[in-house]
Amino acid sequence: MIRVAAIMFVLLILGATSSQARTFIVDDDSFAEFSSISKAVAAAKSGDTIYLKPGVYQEGIVVNKTLTIKPLLGEKGEFVLAGDGTARVGLSLEAPGCVVEGLTIRDYEEAGIQIVSDGNVIRKNVMSGSMAGLLITGGKENLVESNILLGSLGGIAINSGAKGNMIRNNQAQGCNFSIIVKESKENSLQNNNISSCDYGIYVTNSSSTSISGGKIENANCGLRVEDSSATSATGMALDGASVGLSLRMSIGGDFQDNAISRANDTAIEMIYSSGNLLKSNRITNSSYGITMAESGANKLEENRLDGVDLGLYVEGSGNKNLNNSISESNTVDKVPLIYIYGQEGCSITGRQAAHITLAACRNCSVENNTITNDAIFLVGSEYNQISNNLLHGIFGGIRLANSKRNVVSTNEITDNRFTGVFLYNSSLNRVAENIISGNGNEGLALIFLSDENDISTNVIQENRGYGIRTNFSDRNRIYSNQVRGSGSAGLLIESSNSSAIYENNITSNPVGAVLRSSYSNWIYHNNFAENEEQASDSGNNSWDMGMVEGGNYWSDHHCTGIPCQGLPKLIKGPAYDRYPFPVASGWTLPRTVLADQNETNQTSIDLKNASLPVLQDGSGSFQVSGEISGTATPAGPSLAEGSEDGRAGSAINDTSAEINGSAQIGKEKPVVQQLGYHKAKSA
């Protein structure tokens, strides 16, 4: 009986020994049983550990067993797995539950490590020079932590349905896409630090990605979320990016308590994105703060902006894309942002505000306010009164986009960085009795289908660009304005037709008036005085209203008669004023010439059958009493102030993010399409 028990004990011990995990040692100098990792993997069984001695192992390895691969304890030096020019992947983990730790993996055509299985741990490795340092394809619940990614197209790439993976405490530097999550869901990114890249974190066509903590520095774009849903990002630091946070075609995101600093383009941009929450984010020392294009149903709360040039800009082609909840708890330098959507009869009076936007509003008044940072914006709004506001030394002045029948009057718009009053695709508005001076671009600009506006009795002086500029905008009345001391021309009419320009004082400009590719305009009864060049005209326009009504006063032209006869003023182009006046405002004096007709020098204008547009004000209602024939169809829009030819492409750069080596990485473009902010150009 004792002998039987002894035999059974021995058999039990042997059985236990045969089932225990084994260890293998690999040395590239052949001082160990295996000189290659692949051979050790082939000999091993699931649960075994493969230890590496220092060396360079040039091979590609398929791990189809649950193994641990790591440096031999106590050894010093590099443990390098390097591409040999034939292997596309360094380590391909096909079995679940593997551990890869402490290796340097470099120079593989496709990926340093590829995971197609679940529950693996990738820890404390250095991966560089491969298209992807680490590629998770469809794997679930893998842990990737404390690795260093250098100089790859994609540092860490998660795609093809990968789910529930944890990526934490990694460092990436010099990668195009440092971390990319594509076509995957419920992955978590925590406390990763990224620098000097095109994209810090790129989430595309994915859902329920959770991002928290970590810092992204000096990226083209810090965090891009594209065509994705239910993405969250909290507690991140984004510093020195061109664009800090970019949301494109994304819904239902939650972005809270992030710090975005030194964004040299835009701190947060939204394009075609809806239902997102931006709360308690801190934006500092950036160019644009928050911009939103074609994005509705978003909520902004308690965001704090300090030291930004532009705090908020919202644009949209329809009301649903303007319907955002933006509370006054959002501030710029502790002064509230005011955003009003869809209200009628509202009043904003006597406030100090960093910014005011009326979006899809009617019959509202904005009066006696002081704007401290941005501008006053009207988007998709009509019949509003904007008057007696002070806009001094801030980003822009007053901007109307897709808005009509508004009155902008008696505002003081001075010494701002960009254009004083800017209308884009906005018609039937009245801009009158404003002081517009010392602004960094144009004094007043009518851009792209801003037709039939009434521009009168404004003082427009010493603006850096043009005093008044129209571009692809027809049938406007520009009269009784003081335009002087502009950095470029006092008046620029380009690709704009059938407007009436009269009784303006245009003085002391490099060029008084420039007409480019413009036709059927009336320019008469203006005082052109002391301009370096008085005027030029490359179109077919009328510079006088016939021998009785006459033309303009030119300080460098001497003649006799009220108006002068027989000595026309020649205008570079060529064009001419046949009946100039010898004295300023000579048209107010008794005429020395009588005639039965008021012929002009522009044969296409029929004064008997055409009348000028007249805008009536006082009741908030505007009616056009006549139309001018010969309206030209514009060749294309100008979305930016200062465009020489009036054409501009989309400002939205929808760069795709692929991890197939074909992605084109470009500098982030501004999202703002209709701001028109540019450096002033000379005539």
Image (cartoon, grey):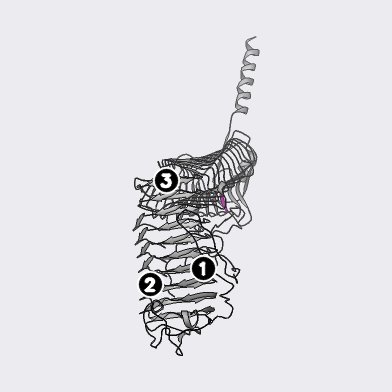
Pointers 1 and 3 in contact (CB under 8 A)? no
Q: Is disc 2 placed on a helix, strand or loop?
A: loop
Spatial CA distance of label 2 from label 1 is 18 Å
Tag 1: amino acid: Asn
Spatial CA distance of label 1 from label 3 is 32 Å
Dot 2 surroundings within 10 Å: few (below 14), some, or many (20 or more)? many
Query: Mark 2 or 1 closer to N-term?
Result: 1
Quadrant of the drawing holding the N terminus: top right
Identify the disc placed on residue 410: none
Tag 2: amino acid: Gly
| Percent x, y of residue 605 | 57, 76
Can residue 343 be seen at all in this image of the molecule?
A: yes
| Percent x, y of residue 283 | 40, 48
| Segment colored magenta | 125-133
User: Which residue is painted at 51% across and 79% down in the image?
Assistant: 542
- Please name whichever residue, 230 or 223, is drawn nearer the observer in this view of the structure: 230
- Please name whichever residue, 95 or 344, is drawn nearer the observer in this view of the structure: 344
Tag 3: amino acid: Ser
Mark 2, residue position: 487
User: Mark 1 or mark 3: which is in front?
Assistant: 3
Mark 3, residue position: 347
| Percent x, y of residue 603 | 58, 81
Magenta residue check for 145: no
The residue most toward the top is 1
User: Which residue is painted at 40% across and 46% down in the image?
Assistant: 348
Identify the disc placed on residue 471: 1
